[in-house]
């Protein structure tokens, strides 16, 4: 029991520090999940084997979650699901006011594009998707 307490405390500190940065990549997710799994394994099984099993299971789960988060962020940045030929961006609709366009994505916000050249990619500040300035 004396050897598992320091491992559990250090793993707990690692989980707390990683939780503030989030699982932005599969590697970060694996580290966070492994630390959390090690803590749970050490507390529940009270042996080195259960700590190792918990760390392995947590690392796998964390890596999967990190991959899903990374793919979701990439899809949002690129304007939606990626097609085989690459991302396809929608074109905004010109509004009746000069220098403003209507986003092709819901809720169809009006976006200020003054100073942005036609044909350029613009990020919709409301939806976070990218569209083409007409």
Image (cartoon, grey):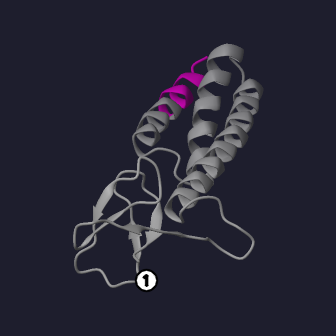
Residue 91 in sight:
yes
Q: Is residue 35 above or below residue 43?
A: below
Q: Provide residue 57's location: percent of width, then percent of height.
A: 74, 34
Where residue 128 sits, quadrant-wise, is bottom left
Q: How many marks?
A: 1
Disc 1 secondary structure class: loop
- Above or below for 108 versus 14: below
Residue drawn at point x = 53 percent, y = 63 percent: 79
Depth order, front residue of 116/91: 91
Displayed quadrant of residue 121: bottom left
Residue at 64% x, 42% y: name it.
65
| Up-down relation of residue 125 to residue 60 (above or below) | below
Given residues 45 and 30, the one toward you in this image is: 30
**Which image quarter: residue 50?**
top right
Q: Is residue 9 magenta?
A: yes
Q: Is residue 73 left or right of residue 98?
A: right
- Report the span colored magenta: 1-10
Q: Residue at x 55, y 50 (%)?
A: 28
Decide: few, some or many residues near mark 1? Use Cα within 10 Å; few <14, some 14-19, many ≥20. Answer: few
**Residue 15 located left or right of residue 42:** left
What residue is rendered at 41% in x and 81% in y? 120
The residue wearing badge 1 is: 119
The N terminus: image quadrant: top right
């Amino acid at each position: 029991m004396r050897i598992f307490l320091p491992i559990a405390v250090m793993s707990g500190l690692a989980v707390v520090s990683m939780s503030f940065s989030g699982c932005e990549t599969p590697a970060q997710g694996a580290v966070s999940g492994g630390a959390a799994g090690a803590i749970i394994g050490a507390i529940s099984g009270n042996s080195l084997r259960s700590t190792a099993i918990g760390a392995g299971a947590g690392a796998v789960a964390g890596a999967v979650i990190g991959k899903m988060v990374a793919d979701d962020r990439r899809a949002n940045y690129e304007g939606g699901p990626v097609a085989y030929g690459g991302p396809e961006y929608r074109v905004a609709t010109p509004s009746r006011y000069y220098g403003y366009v209507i986003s092709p994505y819901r809720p169809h916000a009006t976006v200020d594009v003054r100073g942005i050249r036609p044909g350029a990619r613009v990020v919709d500040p409301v939806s976070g998707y990218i569209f083409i300035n007409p």
